Amino acid sequence: MSEAVGFVGLGHMGLPMAHNLLRAGYRLRVYNRTPAKAAALAEQGAELVGRPADVAAPGGIVITMVANDQALEAVTLGADGFGEQLGPGGVHLSMSTVSPAIAQRLAAHYQARGAAYVAAPVFGRPDAAAARKLWVCTSGPQAAKERVRPVLDALGQGIFDFGAAPEAAHVVKVAGNFLIVSAMEAMAEAFTLAEKHGIERGQIASMLAQTIFACPIYQNYGKMIAEETYAPAGFRLALGAKDLNLVLDAASTARVPMPFASLLHDRMLSALAKGRADMDWTAVGLAVSEDAGLK
Amino acid sequence: MSEAVGFVGLGHMGLPMAHNLLRAGYRLRVYNRTPAKAAALAEQGAELVGRPADVAAPGGIVITMVANDQALEAVTLGADGFGEQLGPGGVHLSMSTVSPAIAQRLAAHYQARGAAYVAAPVFGRPDAAAARKLWVCTSGPQAAKERVRPVLDALGQGIFDFGAAPEAAHVVKVAGNFLIVSAMEAMAEAFTLAEKHGIERGQIASMLAQTIFACPIYQNYGKMIAEETYAPAGFRLALGAKDLNLVLDAASTARVPMPFASLLHDRMLSALAKGRADMDWTAVGLAVSEDAGLK
Amino acid sequence: MSEAVGFVGLGHMGLPMAHNLLRAGYRLRVYNRTPAKAAALAEQGAELVGRPADVAAPGGIVITMVANDQALEAVTLGADGFGEQLGPGGVHLSMSTVSPAIAQRLAAHYQARGAAYVAAPVFGRPDAAAARKLWVCTSGPQAAKERVRPVLDALGQGIFDFGAAPEAAHVVKVAGNFLIVSAMEAMAEAFTLAEKHGIERGQIASMLAQTIFACPIYQNYGKMIAEETYAPAGFRLALGAKDLNLVLDAASTARVPMPFASLLHDRMLSALAKGRADMDWTAVGLAVSEDAGLK
Amino acid sequence: MSEAVGFVGLGHMGLPMAHNLLRAGYRLRVYNRTPAKAAALAEQGAELVGRPADVAAPGGIVITMVANDQALEAVTLGADGFGEQLGPGGVHLSMSTVSPAIAQRLAAHYQARGAAYVAAPVFGRPDAAAARKLWVCTSGPQAAKERVRPVLDALGQGIFDFGAAPEAAHVVKVAGNFLIVSAMEAMAEAFTLAEKHGIERGQIASMLAQTIFACPIYQNYGKMIAEETYAPAGFRLALGAKDLNLVLDAASTARVPMPFASLLHDRMLSALAKGRADMDWTAVGLAVSEDAGLK
């Protein structure tokens, strides 16, 4: 029988991921800040616990899928966190989009206790999570990565490794999200240019999605930006703004000027200032239309 | 037997396109500023002429594949141009990347003479041209577009139409090129961020090219930017700079602020100032590395 | 008695300048597209003529103070222009804000005819023109500059020379206007930052204007931007947009990336798209407030 | 006899300020991390102490002039800090350029202990500090501000008040520094444009400094940027980079997109990446020249 795995964070992504682990035969001890979300999981056999610390078994695996650095710090190093419970041989499989800095801090914390931090952030939205179609980027100690491999196989369709540094996979993840938002802004500019020249946004979007940009990001987000369906949110703009902050922090640390990222950060800031935190993150495109005198 | 078609401009793109027309059974009258390039075509049966005006037969079709607006103006409205030779029923099939403004001027010129301007710029590099894998965007009068359809079928793998306005397909083309350069810059920023965090550029490029950005632009240009192979040029940076100018001109005309395009224009300008006109246009990425203190 | 001087362009700037020349004892032959504006001048002794060509006397001086390159081209090289009337020894004293490119063209035109082009654009608004408080930047042939010196002394409070090149003073002028708009944007950003932190815009503006930025640009425009009095226009935003275009054209020609100028160009474009052409050019600051969710 | 004042931080600014207080008759207890710098002060009667905590007398005044938030936190809330020694009635007169956030934290800390935080950052370089020519911006509790007024009068030539909020004057200070760096970048762009059009940088700088920008920032920094004398540092670029970070943090908190500030942040980051931390902060202009293919 499979080993028990701890799981913290049952949001839009965490919940379907936890389901897939149950389906793959893992026993789960789960914690979520709002317990109601865990009810369906409990019916399927997951054990609900009252504190993050209770998901961990000495030497076991704990997965986190939480909103941001603050949440991750709380469930690990906070008063009720599992940071001291993981123990020798334990692995913290950190799958959220968090900062390289916190990964380094946690890795040092675990190393001093004989445990390991494995970074494993994912690309994919909730439907991809449900369909086990996530792409996973990993980094961390080799032995720990090998140990969690079956767990990751139960969650995604492919794993890409980026070496031993605890923060490496997180850098790759935030760089990837930056590329996504860059594509959104570029499409919004291109489609608005077309629109003001009398061309339908949907027509240019469709052509590009079938030809030189025939890939999911341009196809899916391109459709939303062409149709200007910025709500409801598949991924909240407030979270996208957080990710841009992570990119710029990582850029400052490494001293890499990223002018596109700076510009996108300002777009996000403006969207937040205008009350668009709960719109989809594609709503950066709304400002492009507004700046062109549309809307 | 197929009708005779005029063809002006035997550069990296024009030459393989003309070959494909010969292969498809078209008789060709070709003109190139430097006649030597046309020799191979002549061996295959193309008729070489000494002036652009001589490629046109009254009521016939003339294809242009030239470097820029100035060249297009010279071969059409210039002293030796074919602008007066096309005559009633003639079609100028304009496949270069040129400005919406010159398309409107030429369309008006032809309309007054009973001829037609069909915009048909293409996406694809010389190898795609040779393999009949170009994507073609068209706009112009419906009857004229129907007439040239077999010609376009002999050149590309798909045609996308954008209505009757002579400039529409050109707007789409320059918008597409803008999207390509945006992707380059974004990748260069992301890869440099990764590099300065100790991650190999090639590794992140490869992951993205297999997952969320599995499309030609990210795959092909991503590889070049990851490997920093900015020469020899597949597409000269000087031409990319020209295309960015076309984008910004179209944006000014329509009053669409395009901050990414403005930033890319400055990147191109800097590259030209540094003597990089003959490098590949992916060399915009070189400045990203330099700004980060690399090189 | 002073010699007769031709004067073309009686707008907000040209009219008070022409008055000052009359006051200084010059005889004037004036042309304006809308003759009504010249009536007051005529009462004071100016001779009104019906075509630009008629302001010029062979070997004489003609001043132009017109809106843009197109207007300058029309009154010089156009059908009724004075470009052929100036004759050997004549001087075209070009005081408008126009492009370096047209200056070079006109200089070559005159040189071939024994006449001279003297660039003499000015800094100062209409009230400064009326008060003979303009600052004049000159460039052009030395002898011609010496000849027009008394005329310039009657118009401004100081002359700064930039050598023999016909375009030099125009480059300086557009660079200066770029600096002014940069200061506006910077102030708008700073004041909006203060405002959203609960500080009155007027208070920070006033402190800066009395201390490290105690100069006219920050004092006068700072007050407008602090009070957000963007109308009526002292200098129309549409003209500011034109000037930004001149800056970017000069930057492209010389291959100088100017990221602030590119950003300001986009601000201007957005303002035009939103129908703000007739507001004061300080209205670039309005978008800063809007982007911050104010208004 | 004047009361004793504590003084922490004897750097380029702090040392001349402390001298002026001695001259004005204040008794000083001073602390500096490197005691050697305090020797000259001791000869003039200042009392040197070994820990920040020792500069404070219960209910007294302590001035801080330190490098950044980290240093300020260390000397106040750190193990040897004076944060607990100030006591009821005490005033921390905080004159460094620090973040609005730390001002709020310290103000809350003191309020709970009956003491007060007065923000009093200054504009002016070391020579202005020595000459009592600083401009001081204040904010904080009214009574505390009145009490420290004579102290500030001994240090500067003018005081501008921004109300009761502890962070207000700091926001104004970082906004002011942002304006300064914006002026530097704008001048560097303008001068480089001129240079590449064959005009001497010094000539355009001089004209502007005598006319529309006749104020210290444009006169002093304009000269340095025109002459490209980027070393030795009057104000280290690394500190300028820190200030830009403070601006962007304040902008993020208040949700104010500041595109000029974002661009300048990237300039600073690039300069740091290129090893220019110890050059003068005007060296942002160096990159403008490099981007234009000069150097």
Image: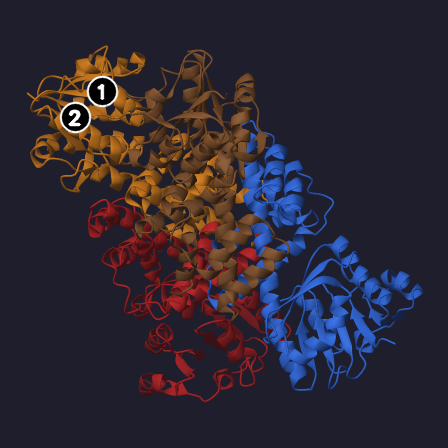
Chain colours: A blue, B brown, C orange, D red
Evaluate if marks 2 and 1 touch, with contact meaning CB atoms under 8 Å apart.
yes
Q: Position of residue A153 (x, y in %)?
A: 75, 67
Among the two numbered marks 2 and 1 on one chain, the one whose residue lies closer to the N terminus:
1
Read off the chain for label 2.
C
Image-quadrant location for residue A172: bottom right
Element carrying mark 1: helix
Q: Position of residue D244 (x, y in %)?
A: 46, 61
In whole angstroms, how far apart are the C-alphas of marks 2 and 1? 9 Å
Q: Would residue C185 be found to the left or right of residue D39 on screen?
A: right
**What residue sits right under mark 2 in the picture?**
C109
For label 1, the crowd category at 10 Å Cα-Cα, with few meaning under 14, some 14 to 19 and many 20 or more, is: some
Which residue is located at x 76 percent, y 58 percent?
Answer: A129
Please name the amino acid that badge 1 sits on: Leu
Q: Closest to the observer: B280 or B44?
A: B44
In the displayed structure, would residue D176 be above or below residue A144?
above
Question: Which image quarter holds the C terminus of chain A?
Answer: top right
**What residue sits right under mark 1 in the picture?**
C77
